[in-house]
Amino acid sequence: MLERAKRAARAALEAWRRAASASHVRQSRPHVTRATLASGLARLGVAPGDTLFVHSSLKSLGYVEGGAVAVISALQDAVGPQGTLLLPTYYLPGGSVRATCAMPDYVFDPRRHGTHMGRLPEAFLASDAIHRSIHPTHSVSAWGRHAADLTEAHHRAPSIFGMGSPWQRFIACEQAKVLGLGISMGPVTFYHALEDAMGDAFPVPVWEDDVKLLACLDHAGRRWDVPVRPFDQAVAQRRIDHASRNDLRDYFAREFDAAGLRVNGQVGDAASWCIPAQAFYAHLHRLASEHVTIYASAAQLAARPIGRA
């Protein structure tokens, strides 16, 4: 009973916080429409038939008339009926992969577990014709032409981002692009696809030694035990998405700009970017061969000038 009351209080507090934030944005930020968003996406090079992996900050877009649903509609307008959208709908009740692995009796159930990834992924997950991958920490959801193929059998992949995962399947798609709406080059899980693909050849040991088995239920209620290997916490403290690594985020932005791979522009009120996925992956592989990764030290960055041929 006490735990139920605590959950209700947390939900009420979150609802109040969101309402207050929406009111502030409505009064202080530019008003943006679905059509305005679609136009901005087109200027970034998003085209009909594209398969987009979308990382986003909804509040950065300004006050969107119609909210998160209008943003999803604008993304669908931009890629058209032959396109595909993927959004991270991760569920991490422990707050991290490692802490979630340590939770006793945790079983991921897509029929009742939502996502901790923010309002846009929440709205996407609740919209029509969505396919969701089965995974205890990194479930991905998709809409469109390739949605079923990209999300099926994630729970049978040997690792979160490895062969058979949505990331590796996404890279193989024609017209695959990574889209950052109002975010830096930091919070982009696409980076980890290279780590899983390279395995021990990746220049940084990013994983803990032990592989955990976490339980999942699929959409029919069948149980699966899924291998999950937590990130090494000491290594994660120097990763590109850590608050202290402005230097690394800036380096990657300038590097991909200098390589001519990143298209930059405004979507709504948000500074946004788009990179073709296969070229993104290939360039990350090249950087790793030169000892520059999303964990690189300041000295390693200094040793490799931006845009070196």
Image (cartoon, rainbow, N blue to C red):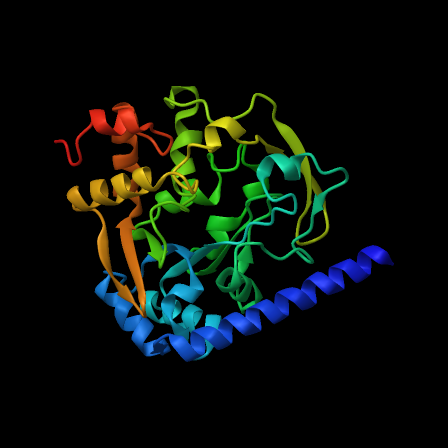
Nearer-the-camera pick, 171 or 37: 37
Visible residue check, residue 199: yes
Which picture quadrant has residue 248? top left
Drawn side of residue 148 relative to residue 210, left or right: left
Q: Position of residue 149 (x, y in %)?
A: 47, 50
Q: Which residue in the rendered view is the most extreme toward the right?
A: 1
Which picture quadrant has residue 196? top left
Question: Which part of the image, by quadrant, shows the N terminus?
Answer: bottom right
Q: Residue at x 58, y 38 (%)?
A: 97
Q: Position of residue 270 (x, y in %)?
A: 32, 64
Q: Residue 267, relative to residue 36: is it above or below?
A: above
Q: Position of residue 99 (x, y in %)?
A: 64, 37
Q: Residue 124, relative to residue 216: is it above or below?
A: below
Q: Residue 82, relative to residue 278: is it above or below?
A: below
Drawn side of residue 273 relative to residue 108, left or right: left
Q: Position of residue 126 (x, y in %)?
A: 57, 66
Nearer-the-camera pick, 80 or 121: 121
Visible residue check, residue 81: no
